[in-house]
Amino acid sequence: MNRRSRESNRRDSQPQHARSHSGPTRRQFLLTGSTALTATAVGLTSGESVGAENAATAAPPDIDPGFIGPQYFDEKERQALMEVMEQGSPFRYWGPGRPEKVQRFEEGFARCMGTRFALGVTSGTAALDCAVAALGVGPGDEVIVPAYTWWSDYTCVVHSGALPVFAEIDRTLNIDPRDFERKISPRTKAVIAVHLLGGPCDMDPLMEVARRRGVRVVEDCAQCVGGSHHGRKLGAIGDVGIYSFQINKMMTSGEGGALVTNDPVLYERAVRFHDMGTIRSLFLDRMGGPAQVPTFAGENFRMNELTGAVLGAQLTKLDTMVAQLHRNGEAIYLGIQDLPGMRLRRRPDPEGDIGYSVFFETADRAARDRCIDGLRKRGVPASTLVGSVLLPVQESVIAKRTRHRDWPTFNSPEGRAIEYGPGCCPQTLAIFDRFVQVRVGPKYTPRINDYIIETIRDVHHAAEV
Ligand SMILES: *Cc1c(COP(=O)(O)O)cnc(C)c1O
């Protein structure tokens, strides 16, 4: 753990105020990662923060879960970065020396995920834009997106000119496969299966519906990098998988993203879109044949060598990060599952859960808030669901605002007719209101796990959930 985060841990945790209905902001999510639980929020310094009455139950000093990837930074990242600096080659395709960090990272990442191809890009958002471009999604098409997820799953569809159609989440906290099927129309081209909050989607029914109805599947693994579903790595199951390496996710380079696929034509289209429409020999060599797609207008989402250097080093530690988080997450689930009335997150494959957090359901919003309050008072990193947004109730979504008034997304007959707002996702809003999230740290000791278990047991009982 880095020094700053250790210092913040020394100050004891204090209660936070209940969250608003719209959920925490991105900023609050960031804070949850390291400093939201510190005493500074309520104006206390470390000496004053522990009152006599709760000194006996003071949280262990290292209960701040921290950001995951940076806790694994060491000589390996430093050495790889120095190689790029010393060669003076921060650009992936040419420069003095032999730049090959991004190329090696892509090869290693494809091996790790069990796919034929991987492409490094500048962010998870850019990877989604490439995925949608690879599938040829555009005006007149519809794409089904879960009602609770990160903005990028909505914006990639809007930027393509296609129409976003929301599906409900269920108690997996991921897309409800039955509602996905209900939302399919003759114009549906793809679904974005988001593996949110460290846990895989219910992929068996989802893939069955998608294949039967001819809908392409993008797996968004940004919040589940290294997770799996019945032994297959997430991202390798659908048509295209995408990942984020932003600091809140798993392995990290601050910003960064990747796309994987087994399909050479989808890969070529993604590569072209990420590099102004061009394709370089490196990619043709990988695909083992001539180009199959004519040049078309693209973007510049190329990854640089400094990012590739850090990610190459982080990739060698991904299995360890996942194993350590998973071990702690499972220990906590195991310690609370027998509580009378305890309703855990439904998990289609607990083995594939990366253990980023544990989740349980309460009766209603008031019970949820009582629970969160009780846990935070005792220093446990509890909150409402964090890191995503209830998209259909966002003002800019309800207003269908785009970058230009004639943008095609909402100008088709279907786009003009569609109505967002709370009416299109009642199940999602109700689920959001009932769930408690407790963050998990990869470096937690059994003592910290036990402290969290005991505190959840006390609070769950007292909060009458
Ligand atoms: C973070 C995130 C993204 C976007 O990744 P960036 O690297 O931040 O652009 C996409 N989808 C989900 C579910 C995310 O959590």
Image (spheres, rainbow, N blue to C red):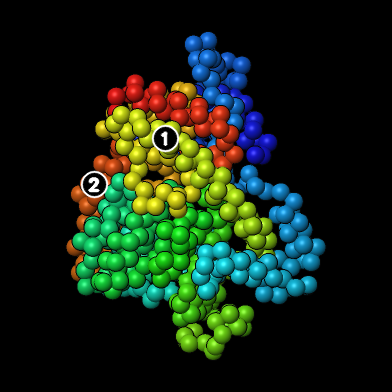
Q: Which mark is residue 427?
A: 2
Q: Is residue 220 left or right of residue 47?
A: left
In the picture shown, does residue 272 fall above or below 159? below
User: Is any part of residue 33 visible from this angle?
Assistant: no
In the picture shown, does residue 219 fall above or below 430? below
User: How far separated are the C-alphas under marks 1 and 2?
Assistant: 20 Å
Which of the marked residues, 1 or 2, is nearer the chain's N terminus? 1
Amino acid type indicated by mark 1: Ser
Residue, disc 1? 383
Q: Position of residue 27 (x, y in %)?
A: 48, 42
Residue at the right extreme, as displayed = 86
Tell me which residue sits at (32%, 65%) in the image.
Answer: 207
Tell me: is circle 1 under 8 Å from ligand 1.
Answer: no
Tell me which residue sits at (63%, 53%) in the image.
Answer: 317
Rate crowding at label 2 as few (under 14), some (14 to 19) or many (20 or more) other CA atoms within 10 Å: some
Under circle 1, the secondary element is strand
Residue at the bottom extreme, as displayed = 290
Residue 106 found in image quarter: bottom right
Tell me which residue sits at (74%, 63%) in the image.
Answer: 84
Q: Position of residue 175 (x, y in %)?
A: 31, 55
Q: Which of the two residues, 354 or 50, is positioned nearer the viewer here?
A: 354
Under circle 2, the secondary element is helix
